[in-house]
Amino acid sequence: MITKEFTPFENKVWLATPTMHGEELKYVTEAYDTNWMSTVGANINEVERIAAERAEMKYAVGLSCCTAALHLCVKFAGEKLYGKPAISHGALEGRRVFCSDMTFDATLNPVVYEGGIPIFIDTDANSWNMDSVALEKAFEIYPDVKLVVSAELYGFPGRMDEIKKICEKNGAILIEDAAEAMGATIDGKQCGSFGDYSAISYNGNKIITGSSGGCLLTNDIQVANKARKWSTQARENAPWYQHEEVGYNYRMSNVIAGVVRGQYPHLEEHIAQKKAVYERYKVGFKDLPVQMNPITDGTEPNYWLSAMIIDKEYMCKQVRDDSKALYIKEKGKTCPTEILETLAKYNAEGRPIWKPMHMQPMYRMHECIGRDGSIRCRTNAYIAGGVADVGADIFERGLCLPSDNKMTVEQQNKVIEIVRACFE
């Protein structure tokens, strides 16, 4: 453990928490006073209008969460590609789908809901997002694949435009998981506008929040209308409850929409605050052997979570299984486990970087394709067949730092000193 001692933070320094402004309560109260407490109302209508406008898409459908939005994206894509399935099967039954490897499992679980088989695409070391070179190799190996689900990590987008071009060249549909990247841009174009269908999140720790909720984004009116139908239990236009296909209880609440509606005017303000946090870390760590989230040329992140990876030669010995981590302290070296435990000791919250999907117990038998076309499976090794496993390497050396936009400069300076002390 570090030898330098600090006074614990009196108030916990969080990874990321909601930032409320007051307008949210106005719209929630409006829903209450008008008795529109269900899944219809002025707040939902306005959130859908604003969400589509902000994302530079024609249509938005307000849903209970981003995972629901992704599920309906996947379901529609599957039916468009392969036809309507039997009730007992999903639209992608037995079909391979290319998916981001370094992401939260909500990105690809909807593929499994619909019976698909995720094939993971390794991570680009220069962006921490889906490697476009690896994706091209994947299409060479499996030219029959017609669906790609790609996420943008921590609000720092890679070149989703390149991913889109590769999909178009191969006749594939692109689903863009922009849950973490709302307000980020690529060459001035909004994240969430690159996918044939896209999803954004209003979860409690996102750049703006509704406590929950999400939107499906599309330029296709048929997709928007189908999503609205499916999300309200697929009720047919009949005087009674008539059902001809499986539906879901996925519609956004008008109350939740009131919170989101009150948050949208503050999106740019939150992004500016998150950017200031990121830049203070960059300055504070400039002489440490670490690298912050990479910023891809031509992109402007929303800086949702500041993360870092430790240079390989400054990593102390660390081992992790599926639930525990151990390390041996070495002078001048550290590891994510030590830093996270030390931050927690002083009442500050950090997190490990997303564990790649091909390393997760439920997906270890699934293939992960590297930029040289190598295929890995049944392993969580960092080197497979002599080829670097980029996602596993970032997970081994990386962590997310406290990134709350209400963290004071004094609190962040102390976090920086705690991290620096771990290298002593």
Image: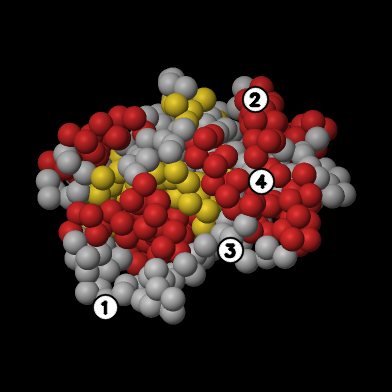
Badge 1 density bin: few <14, some 14–19, many ≥20, Cα 10 Å: few
Q: Secondary structure at mark 2?
A: helix
Please give the residue where the numbered disc 1 appears in the rendered image.
Answer: 88
Q: Is residue 319 above or below residue 6?
A: below
Badge 3 density bin: few <14, some 14–19, many ≥20, Cα 10 Å: many
First reached walking from the N terminus: tag 2 or tag 3: 3
Please give the residue where the numbered disc 3 appears in the rendered image.
Answer: 39
Q: Quadrant of residue 219?
A: top left
Q: Position of residue 296 (x, y in %)?
A: 44, 25
Q: Nearer the viewer, residue 217 or 312?
A: 217
Disc number at residue 279? 2
Residue at point 44%, 43% (across, down): 59
Do tag 1 and tag 3 residues touch (Cβ < 8 Å)?
no
Q: Secondary structure at mark 3?
A: loop
Image position of 170 (left or right of 97)? left
User: What is the count of numbered marks?
Assistant: 4
First reached walking from the N terminus: tag 1 or tag 4: 1
Cα distance between the residues tagged 1 and 3: 28 Å
Q: Nearer the viewer, residue 336 or 93?
A: 93
First reached walking from the N terminus: tag 2 or tag 4: 4
Q: Nearer the viewer, mark 1 or mark 3?
A: 3
Q: Quadrant of residue 208?
A: top right
Please give the residue where the numbered disc 4 appears in the rendered image.
Answer: 261
Three-letter amino acid code of the residue under disc 2: Glu
